[in-house]
Amino acid sequence: RRATPTVTFGGVESASVSVSYSDTFSTEVVATVPAVASGAGVSQVVVSSGGSSAAASFQLVTPGLSVSCTSGCVTSLSGNTAATLIVGGFPLDAALSITVGGSAAPITTTQTVAGGAGLVTSVSVTLPAYAPASPAPEHKVWLTVTTITDASVTAAAELTYREVPRVVSTKFDTAGMAVTAAFDQDTNGQGSPNCLSYFLLTDLRAFGTSPHCVWASPAALTITLSSGATAVPGTQVPFIMDTVSSLDTLSGVGTGATLTVLAPDIKQSPSILIQGPNGIGACDSADLSVEGAVGRGATYSWSCFDNSAVHALVSSQTGSAVSFPGSMLSLGVPVTLSATATSFLGAVSAPSTLQVTTKSVPPPVVSMGMDPEPYKKSHGITAFASAKLSACAPPGAESQIVFTWVVSEGSQPKPAGEAVMTASGSSMYIPPDTLKGGVKYHLRCMVVDGAGTAVSVQRVIRVSSAPLVVSLLGGDRLAFRGSTGVTFDASQSYDPDQCSESAAKDGICASTGITFDWECALSSGGQCRSKSGSRAVASFAALSVLS
C-alpha cells in the first residue's frame, strides 16, 4: 500500500487526504477541497507522491450560479457551430461574457425563459475553434460564463471538441492475407464498402486486383488481399479520408492520410510438406514438390545432409520443386531431403523431410495430395494418390494398379483392423465428423502394381480444435441500482469438437471439461470493484449461470 499523497487545488494544499485503494492499475484518493481564492477560473489539482505527480484541471464557480449546454455541445476542432446554453442565477439584465478554452464565444441571441426554479436566460453562442496541445479523439473544454463588470463571478460547463479520426496503425494479419487499419476512435464506417471509397485505383492495386474492404468494427477497416497483391511491410499507400468522420459525424471529415503497412506482431509460420516418391528405380527421377499454406512470394531452401552430390544439386534452388536422377543414389541406401519455406513476412516454416531410396525392383512412383489446411472436424477431407510406373519396371507391371487407404489415429501407422476408416481407389473422401478435433491422424495409401510390386505413401495431419462457442443468453442490456437482480446464463456454450449446435440448443450437448471464468470491466478500462468496504476487485464464482 502506497503512502498517502499530497493533494493541492490551485496551489492550496488539502488538509484531509485518504487513499481508498491502490493496486497496479490505479489508486483512488479522496481529498477535501480547501478554500481557494475566487476568480481563479480553470486551475489545477495536483497529486504528488514519492517524487512523482499527476495533474488535472478543475473549474472554480460561484455558488448559486449555473450554466448548462442543451444543444450543440459537441463540435469539431474548427468550431464555428451554434450552441444553446441555459444560464441561471445571474441577474436577468446582466451583460454576459462567454469564453471557451480561453477564447471568446460570440453571443448571437439571448432571451428570458422559464426554468425549474424561476426565470433563466437562454443564450445562443457561436463556438470558437480549439487548438489542443496534443492530439486525442476528443477534448473536454471548459465554457465559462461571467459578467462583463465582474469577472470573478463565474459559472462553468464542459463542452466536447471532437478530432477527425486518425489512423494509428496499419498491420498485416499473422498470415499476411489481410491488412487492418486501426483508428484512434470509433468512426462512421460500417459494412462492406467499395474499397475505391478510400483508395485511388492505382493505389488500391497494392492489395491485389480485387481486394475486399470491410469494417471489422467502427474503429478498424480490414482490407483482404487478392491475387496480384504487392504490399509488403513498409509499403505506403495513400488513404482517402473525405468520407471518414467520428461515429457521431460531429468531428467533420479528414483530408487524407498515408498508410504505412507494418509486419504483424506475431507472424504465422508457413506450414509445408514435401510431396514425392519414397522409392524409385535407378532409371527414374525423383520429382519433389512442396505443398502447404505458404502464401505469395515465398522462397524455399532445399538440402540433403546425407548425400553431397544431391545436396549440391538441390541447395542452389529456391523454388517449390526440385528433381534429381535415381542414378545419383546408391542402391538401397536412403537419402533424406529437407525443405523450409520463408514467407514474404519473413516467417520461416519448420523443416519438412522425405526419404528417397533406389530399389532393384522399382515400385510405381506414387504421390499423395490432399485438400489444403486447416482440417476441421465439421468439414469433409479429400485425399488422392497418383501412381506412375517406373521407366525400368518389369513386364506385366503396366496392368491394373490397386490403391488401398488406411486412416488411423495418432502419428504412427496401425493395422487396418484398428483403423478409423479404410477405403480403396485412387481417392478417398473422409466425411465430416469422422475425425476428432485436436487429434493427429496417420493417412497411408498402399499401391500394388500388376507385377506385385508394392509401395506406400503416407502423411500425418492434425485436425484443428474448433474454438469454444460462447453463448450468453439475454444479450446487452441496462441494469439499474434498483433492479431486483441480473442473471448471466452461459450454460448453452459448447465445444464444437464434442457436440453440434443443435444439440447444444436442445440441451443435450455432451461437452465436457468446459470451465467458466467471469470478469467485469468498466468502459474506461478499469476493474469493477465493491461499492463499499475495502473496494476490493469484484470476483465471481466459476459457474455457467451467474446471478
Image (cartoon, rainbow, N blue to C red):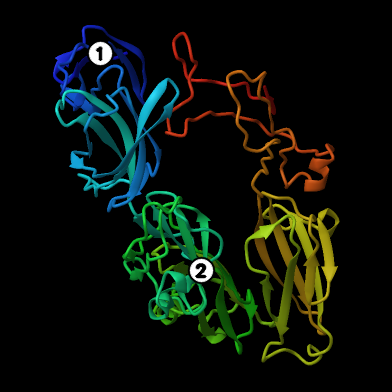
Estimate the x, y position of residue 274 in percent, counting from the top left. 57, 71
Residue tagged 2: 294
Give the image quarter of residue 387.
bottom right
Left or right, 469 with respect to 505, comes to left
Give the image quarter of residue 124.
top left
Residue nearest the viewer, comparing 498 with 222: 222
Estimate the x, y position of residue 310 in percent, counting from the top left. 46, 79
Instruction: Name which residue lies at 41% across and 55% down.
Output: 182
Left or right, 238 with respect to 247, comes to left
Instruction: Name which residue lies at 24% across and 32% down.
Output: 144
Q: Secondary structure at mark 1?
A: loop
Estimate the x, y position of residue 348 in percent, counting from the top left. 43, 63
Q: Amino acid at mark 1?
A: Val
Quote the CA–CA distance across marks 1 and 2: 64 Å
Estimate the x, y position of residue 433 in percent, counting from the top left. 79, 55
Instruction: Name which residue lies at 61% across and 76% down.
Output: 276
First in residue order: circle 1 vs circle 2: 1
Give the image quarter of residue 311.
bottom left
